[in-house]
Image (spheres, rainbow, N blue to C red):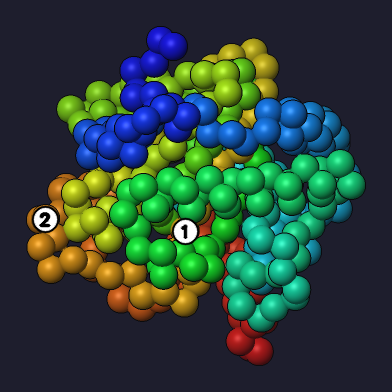
Amino acid sequence: MNALLPVVDLSEDGWEAATDRACREVGFFYVVGHGVDDALQQRLEGAARAFFARPDDEKAEIAMARGGLAWRGWFPVGGELTSGVPDRKEGIYFGRQDPASDVPLHGPNLFPGDDLRAAVLAYLDAMTALGHRLTAALGVDPALVADPTILFRIFHYPPGGDVAAGEWGVGEHTDYGLLTMLRQDATAGLQVRARDGTWIDAPPIAGSFVCNIGDMLERITGGRYRSTPHRVRNTSAVGRLSFPFFFDPSWDAVVPVPEDALPPEQRWDGADPLTFEGTYGDYLTAKVAKVFPELATRLLDRGAGR
């Protein structure tokens, strides 16, 4: 495995200590030996690839605007923003399959067909179990994730794009929550900013997930773990698929900050994840609203009866 990031094998003794070390030193690591069924992953990728091969007017049958406040469904290339800049990717948003709700980011998913529906729902269960296993090893209070907020995306990065002109698949950012577990297809594109400020590639490793800590894990560890900026560019001649699964605190949880928290580091965006007040749901709704500002204005106004 010619990886610059640490590789943690969950089937080996001592993997918990190796995971802690990776979080302290890098903030990104691969996991193998995780037990998530490979056949399920292949079914998921096949169904996703078939969906993104459809024309946009067919994909728009599950457009995100149809998902209401649940913020579920498809968005086209350029439909999602990172730091106010349109990403060069399209994608589908999923979450836990819940009844219709007036709570943002809760509700039923939008599925284009039975194949993707079955694969996504089985994948959500498998990855939720893995999320509990990894966060427990990292010392996360089980009460904080007793009813975790589950967000799952499938992204398609089309080939080409002029990076020099700012056409990134997704620009530099950190993730909002506790832990991200990313499945990649065979096409590279993910880059991670090392502690010295240089960018390193995180190429696909067969059978692995790329994991990284988010801002809330930095918060609850008081900066012992730092969320690490990353970005994506697809310079290949084929489309790239990625499958990020976000394992986050419970919606109503108030995420604590330890009394011995370390001083904040200078971040790429000038933010400090230790300073916000309120529930995780409040925090996440505000973050997603910045990613889809036009949709957010329309849906949140409707939800408030305005």
Q: Disc 1 designates what residue?
A: 248
Of mark 2 and mark 1, the one earlier in the sequence is 1
Compared to residue 113, the image places residue 106 above or below, namely below
- Closest to the observer, 222 or 165: 222
Between 94 and 82, which is closer to the camera in this rendering? 94
* Quarter occupied by residue 40: top right
* Horizontal side of residue 255 vs 285, given as left or right: left
Q: Give the labeled residue for mark 2.
A: 262
Q: Could you classify mark 1 by the number of other residues whose Cα lies within 10 Å: few (under 14), some (14-19), or many (20 or more)?
A: many
Q: Determine which quarter of the picture holds residue 96.
A: bottom right
Q: In the rendered view of the protein, which quadrant contains the N terminus?
A: top left
Q: Secondary structure at mark 2?
A: loop
In percent of the image, x 39 and y 53: which residue is there?
136
* Residue 44 location (% of width, % of height): 74, 36
| Residue 233 visible | no
Q: Position of residue 219 (x, y in %)?
A: 27, 59
Residue found 43% across the figure and 23% down from its top = 202
The answer to whether residue 205 is visible is yes
**Residue plotted at (56% across, 50% down):** 129
Amino acid type, mark 2: Leu
Residue 254 relative to residue 132: left or right: left
Q: Residue at 65% of width from left, 41% of height from top?
A: 154
Q: Give how far across and how far down residue 227 sits, in percent.
A: 31, 45
Asked if 103 appears above or below 235 in the picture, the reply is: below
Q: Amino acid at mark 1?
A: Asp
Give percent across and percent down for residue 120: 73, 46
* Residues under numbered marks 2 and 1 in contact, where contact means CB atoms less than 8 Å apart: no
